[in-house]
Amino acid sequence: MKKFVMAAMGGTLAGVIATTQFVGPLLAQEGAKTTSVYEQLDLFGDIFERIRAQYVEEVDEKKLIEAAINGMLTSLDPHSSYLSPDDADNMRVQTRGEFGGLGIEVTQEEGFVKVVSPIDGTPAAEAGIESGDFITHVDGESVLGLTLDAAVDLMRGPVGSEIVITVVREDQPEPFDVSIIRDTITLQAVRTRTEGETVVLRVTTFNDQTTSGLEEGLAKEVEAAGGIDNVNGFVLDLRNNPGGLLTQAIRVSDSFLEKGEIVSTRGRDLADGERYNATEGDLAQGKPIVVLINGGSASASEIVAGALQDHRRAIVVGTKSFGKGSVQTVMPLRGDGAMRLTTARYYTPSGRSIQALGVSPDIIVQQPRRDAASEEEEPGTTPASRSEADLRGSLNNDSLTEDEIRQIEEDRAKAETAAALREEDYQLAYAIDILKGLSALGPQE
């Protein structure tokens, strides 16, 4: 026992000696590192002065410094950037849900502007801009080499003015131009409707209005259906939703979860990580949920889809989401500007990061592209199907009452409506079919 204690003490002593021996070199390294940083800052100052004094044209010193700051931030990742006072004000307006522009959420990839998603009901969506499109030129001017903020500035302009953007699309052999009229973008965060016995909750963005809009819309549809017993489930449609406020993503997830973790964030210092948990209460009252996602579902949308998927509260249907699993903190700066800095990654309840990977659907369902040729066909050209009932002199069905025949006809009309929805929106129709199937099985013990 005495030998063991001595050995333990010896180990501790050796550790102290080793630590003491390394203090000198470590301090020297830290000092050298600090000196190197100051030397680099001196180099920056020297270059700035030379540009100001010797560049071929007179420069705007303020813009030069802002460009240097933005260059430093954008070198970190695509989502960190400097916001001038005007940009910071625009961002605050967008968060409130109304702003001027085209109606697209964009990021940057390989020097070009990439569309994350068009926003429902905006000029960009109506002009046919799609998630995954690359914008290479704005009014004939190339965006290659511009910062994302500079490219976005090119797309801004007075409401009612025209802009021509050049688009490269994966399945198109050549770039093509799209003309768009700028407009005031008023975001309706949530749209609700009922298809048959299914309530469809379309969430287009996560801003200050999202949770309240979801609660009000859901309650309205359930009341119109005659109560929750007449609803077979809910479709939460997050397709082409570029995200928004983390707080709103947490509240929307909490709306359908009774307990458990919703999301966690982890930064460089693990001690600064945060976990957000659900509180009791489920707006859907235990009814099944299908979440729809696609490549335009990003950030806050992925938090909601990941949380409901991990808790097995919803079936996720569609295609892989965008994969933006990082958290940006907006920090006010002197002069009314701001800095948007990536400060953490977020993780779903099971501990998975979706950064660059996205949320994988439980059931992959592609949205078929519309065939332009078939859309141009005249209505009524498809030959009508004929049945026994159409034949002259056919016998009547004598085994059913008039009420039973009426019920069959009503069911058939619902089936035809569902078939028409499949033509219009195949993914949504698929989600509704899942809920119909679950409803047909009845309550599961």
Image: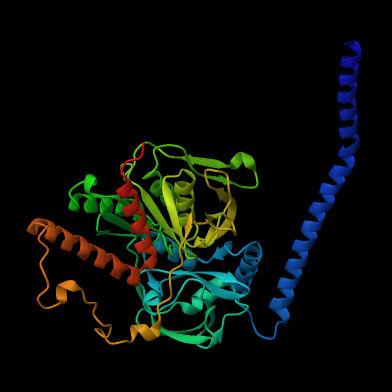
At a point 48% along the width and 71% down the height, the residue shown is 131
Identify the image quadrant of residue 40: bottom right
Quarter containing the C terminus: top left
- Position above or below: 155 against 417: below
Q: Which of 444 and 197 is in front in this view?
A: 444
Q: How many labels does the image show?
A: 0
Outermost residue toward the top in this view: 1
Residue 161 appears in the figure: no
Quarter containing the N terminus: top right
Residue 180 appears in the figure: yes
> 434 left or right of 138?
left
- Residue 108 in percent (x, y) is at 57, 70
> 200 left or right of 265?
left
- Residue 298 in percent (x, y) is at 49, 60
Q: Which of 252 and 316 is in front in this view?
A: 316
At a point 54% along the width and 78% down the height, the residue shown is 170
- Residue 143 in percent (x, y) is at 57, 80
Q: Nearer the viewer, residue 98 or 115?
A: 115
Identify the image quadrant of residue 127: bottom left
> 231 left or right of 116?
left
